[in-house]
Image (cartoon, helix red, strand yellow):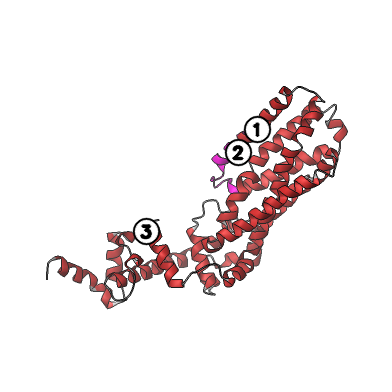
Amino acid sequence: MRAASKQLNAAKKKHKVTGYDTQSLRLTFTYFGPRLLATAGGWFANDVFFYGNKLFQGVFITAIIGKTTSLMPNWLYNLVNIGVSLAGYYLASFLIDNKLYGRKNMQILGFLMDFIFFIVPAFDYTYYTTTGIHAFQAMYFLSSFFNQFGPNAVTFLVAAEVYPTPIRATAHGFSAAFGKLGALTAAVMYSYITTRQKFYVVPWFGLMGVILTVLFLPDTTGLDLKEQERRWQYIRAGRESEYHGVAVHPNHLSWYERFRGVGKYYNADLDYKQKIQEMREEWEANESRRYGEKTGEDDDAFDDSLYSSGVSTYFERTSQRPEMTNHEKVSDETANGV
């Protein structure tokens, strides 16, 4: 974004920003509470799976090859598990921005497959650790693959994207804290239950992740995050219903938000007119500061490169403010030395 630092400094001065405020906190829970439930709960469920998978990896290998004093079999199976996990992670990097698949579908599929691969051996553990050991081995490796090709590649990303910038760090930090709580839960819980009991307990965290993602997580694939900022400005001003942009398009809302009717405000034509008006207001404010009509402003508050010559010419010719239409004339006279 051009002149981003200058715009940021100007915005801070305009709104007298000194830190986090209680109004933002209240609005966060009012308008983004369900999203917090999805990002925090999903991260918690994922870390129970991810760290749980790694914590009893040694037990799993022992169930396959039996007890051995040699380190090579353990290293070999660890290497295979790492390779499978990396394959899932790199495949996720190719598809995470694909609009036909994207973030939300990836997280749902990952949680669902982890649930299946853990619940199946739970109900016939003896068979899968004896006769069906190869199927057990395949399910364990596939659970590692879909954990990486799923929530472990998505949770930390969507926890930032579904929130506007003013509350993004707080919401992301809150979600990350719940994720670490999930890792701690796995570490403590696995110390007090048997290997078979782990397969009874762990799958339900995957199912929890599926439910939270389906119900409360919006899909931000292809969404310009600047739209989150525009919507937040309307929310802060108490004019949520007046925002008609793509951030409230049904494709970028959760099932719960669509059920509440948030998507009814979306209107492409009205949004186009709003954007033109917002750009015009920014241009007029920038021109006013530039020509000294608002005294006392810092020079960093505007930047000549914010608008192309075509945009500036259009706004000059269509402006309803006489002083703006005279700017071009003044500039020409100044350039000619008049």
Q: Magenta stretch: give its range.
A: 87-103
Q: Return the x and y of residue 15 as percentages of the image width and height.
A: 46, 72
For numbered disc 1, what is the local secondary structure? helix
- Nearest to viewer (mark 3 / mark 2): 3
Bin the neighbour count of mark 1 within 10 Å (Cα to Cα): few under 14, some 14-19, many 20 and up: some
Q: Between residue 144 and residue 295, name the one nearer to us.
A: 295
Disc 3 residue type?
Ala
Q: Name the disc covering residue 198, or none.
A: none
Which residue does the numbered mark 3 point to in the structure image?
Answer: 3
Q: Name the disc covering residue 82, or none.
A: 1
User: In which quadrant of the rendered image does the C terminus lie?
Assistant: bottom left
Q: CA distance from mark 2 to mark 1?
A: 10 Å
Mark 3 vs 2: CB contact within 8 A: no
Q: Name the disc covering residue 89, or none.
A: 2
Q: Return the x and y of residue 247 as percentages of the image width and height.
A: 53, 61
Q: Between residue 96 and residue 184, name the one nearer to us.
A: 184
Q: Between residue 335 and residue 322, name the one nearer to us.
A: 335
Residue at image location 59% in from the left, 40% down from the top: 92
Q: CA distance from mark 3 to mark 2?
A: 35 Å
Disc 1 residue type?
Ile
For numbered disc 2, what is the local secondary structure? helix
Q: Tell me: 113 left or right of 289.
A: right
Is residue 331 in view?
Answer: yes
